[in-house]
Image (tube, rainbow, N blue to C red):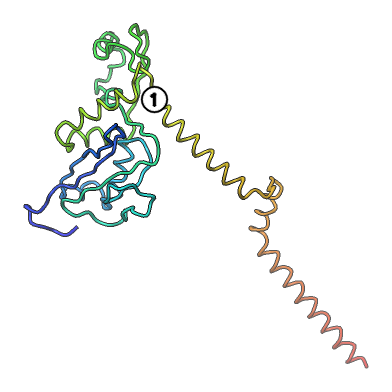
Amino acid sequence: MAQLPAQNLRPVSLKLQFHQPQNHWTAALEIPYDAFPRYSSKPRAWLDYLGHAITGSDGILSLSPESTNGTDACGLDLAVSPGEVYYFHTNGPLAFIDPRISTTVSSHPSSFLDSDFGRALIQRDGKCVFTNTDDCEAAHLLGFMKGDEASHYTIKAWGPLGSAELLRAIADDTYYPEGYYKRKEAQDKQRDDRREARERRRQLHDTEFDAMDLIAMLWGMHNGPALERAERAAEAEAKQRSAEKVTEWLNGH
């Protein structure tokens, strides 16, 4: 990226649409322009990744807030410019990561033997964060995934004032009504949709192609060229022998 005077280095914004009644675009991140080289040589591709990490959905990064069918996608290999605003258009159900189900792990070597762990956990959460049950006798410990940690710290460091609280409220209201864990439901639906799309494509191109056909095709791909060379060599040798026999017969007469 070209060097510009410090006063011109306006932050680059990433906006998300939360599909609330107003359907407004909300600025999720405002990233200092000169911070991009520290994180990626392809800043637009990095913004595209951040959009996916925050929403939990596939989508298209665009410079336009208007609905897109893919034709308005911006080139992910290109650089960003100061003050640009990018819009992440999701392709499927949103599956925001609840910031309260992942916390930094303790660095204490014997923390797993801490007898006060259960009491502290109940005091912190009050109830099961997945089922809304008050009396908990066990807890699932969820390790960080790369996208969870990256989005959490990115929002905390660069998000506009109130963005972290907004995302937390949306996650609670949308994905935890009555304690129901809807993030998995959204992910399962995406998985089912992809499986259904693959099945439709297979039916469109179905030619009764079975396992033996596949074996024959692979054999032909790997051995076909060698077989053709062998056939050409055998044909050339047969012609040579025929020529030699004709010459021998002519010489004998």
Q: Position of residue 96 (x, y in %)?
A: 32, 31
Which of the 4 image quadrants contains residue 170? Answer: top left
Position above or below: 155 against 140:
below
Seen at 28% across and 17% down, the residue is 110
- Crowd tier of the residue under label 1, counting other residues whose Cα lies within 10 Å: few below 14, some 14–19, many 20 or above: some
Horizontal side, residue 114 vs residue 137: left or right: left
Of all residues shown, which one is farthest toward the top? 135
Of all residues shown, which one is farthest toward the left? 7
Seen at 29% across and 26% down, the residue is 171
**Residue wearing tag 1:** 182
Which of the 4 image quadrants contains residue 57? Answer: top left
Amino acid type, label 1: Lys
Which of the 4 image quadrants contains residue 27? Answer: top left
Q: Position of residue 223 (x, y in %)?
A: 67, 59
Position above or below: 167 against 205:
above
Q: Secondary structure beneath disc 1?
A: helix
In front of the other: 229 or 40: 40
Position above or below: 163 against 132:
below
Q: Position of residue 41 (x, y in %)?
A: 26, 52
Q: Position of residue 179 (x, y in %)?
A: 35, 17
Q: Quadrant of the C terminus?
A: bottom right
Position above or below: 73 against 117:
below
